[in-house]
Amino acid sequence: MKNVLLGANTAHGFVSYYDQILVPKAKYLGIIKGGPGTGKSTFMRKIGEKIKNEGFALELLRCSSDQDSLDGIVVLDQGIALVDGTRPHIMEPRYPGCQDEIINFGEFWDRRGICAHIKDIVSLSGEISERYGRVYRLLAAANQLSLDWSASHAQGLNTKGINEVVQRLAALFSSLPVEEDGKERHLFASSLSPKGTLHYLESILSPLERVFVLKDTYSCCAHKILERVLLEAKSRGLFVEVYHCALEPERIEHLVIEELSLGFSITCAHHIYTPEEAEVVDLDRFVDLGQVKETSFLNSQKETERQIMAWAGSELATIKTLHDELEGFYFPYMDFEGTDKLLERTVERIFELLEPSEVPVP
């Protein structure tokens, strides 16, 4: 199974790519609505198991604030998905009734029981919101330090060497005809979580036949290289999965082109993963540290950035504890027998749409 994120807590707040859930193919999207602790993640996990047991490949959409939880599942190559459509990634049907539908967990709760805890629910929800504000301010501060680190080391960058790398990677597509622009899908491969920064690069990159890993300790050039590789791939009509940096989402960190079984990945301080037999491109050799000013200050600054990130992670852990407490005001008042029956109906709906011809042969 492939694990990805369509949203992340970033220096710019919560950034959502949930509108990319079924790019480029869309057949059915079930949007689940319900409160915390109502069983949305478990519901999707159980349905995913049933689909996987029939031999279909799944993409699991991990929750950026609790990566033990699911925000959605996608049946790969089938255009079918289920997603948690509540805050912070609110989704509404685009084509209700014919492609998208609401799966309403509100039908199965005891409203009177929940309302008896209204004061606690409002208080906890307010505190969680305030603490997310603090997380985003901390991440914004860490990002400014990170950008200064990158800009300072770019002073010693050998642009000729970087251009040679770009030409080498662009040559991978030279045998393909130039066509209309291809398509792209935007995601995250990593995120800051209550457990620190976690990534799912193994599930994303290890199935690929060829992977180029760009070593960019100073974070000053690899993302620019990937921008140019993306343009080259799209000019050949290819479909590209574009994975963004979870701290600075304007930066690209990884590219995957499934039809070529080809991937590009940046290894940096936030995530270090190199698949077996990956081709490592050492970009650090193009940075002349002799031209970089105040290196001792920059190293101290980088340590401060790590500390700020740790504070943000600790704050997310507190939010997770508060969210668990909030779930306790919903869980006892749910009719889970009712949601189990809904699960069976949803499975039937999905299996009617699955195309047997696309089931992988064992």
Image: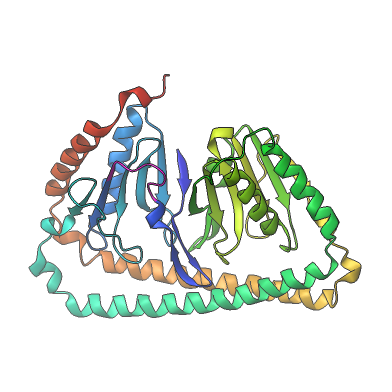
Residue 132 location in percent, x, y? 42, 75
Instruction: Relative to 243, say whether 219 is above or below.
Output: below
The image quadrant that residue 34 belongs to is: bottom left
Q: Quadrant of the N terminus?
A: top left
Residue 37 x %, y %: 26, 60
Give coordinates of residue 280: x percent, y percent.
Answer: 75, 44
The one of 126 and 75 positioned closer to us in this rendering: 75
Q: Quadrant of residue 285?
A: bottom right
Picture coordinates of residue 313 (x, y %)? 52, 68
In this view, the residue farthest toward the top is 362
Residue 114 visible somewhere in the drawing: yes
User: In the rendered picture of this protein, how many numbered marks are placed on residues?
Assistant: 0
Q: Residue, x 57% and y 43% (percent of image)?
A: 256
Q: Is residue 361 left or right of residue 12?
A: left
Is residue 272 in sight in this rendering?
Answer: no
The answer to whether residue 148 is above or below residue 192 is below
User: Magenta span has 25?
Assistant: yes
Q: Residue at x 51, y 79 (%)?
A: 137
User: Which quadrant of the rendered structure holds the C terminus?
Assistant: top left
Q: Residue drawn 29% across and 41% down?
A: 27
Rendered image coloring scheme: rainbow
Front in this rendered view, residue 111 or 264 = 264
Q: Image point 64% across, 46% down: which residue?
A: 232
The stretch in magenta equals: 21-28
Q: Residue furthest right?
A: 290
Q: Is residue 162 magenta?
A: no
Residue 109, by quadrant, is bottom left
State the residue in front, 327 or 153.
153
Q: Is residue 141 left or right of residue 162?
A: left
By secondary structure, the bulk of the magenta-drawn segment is best described as: loop
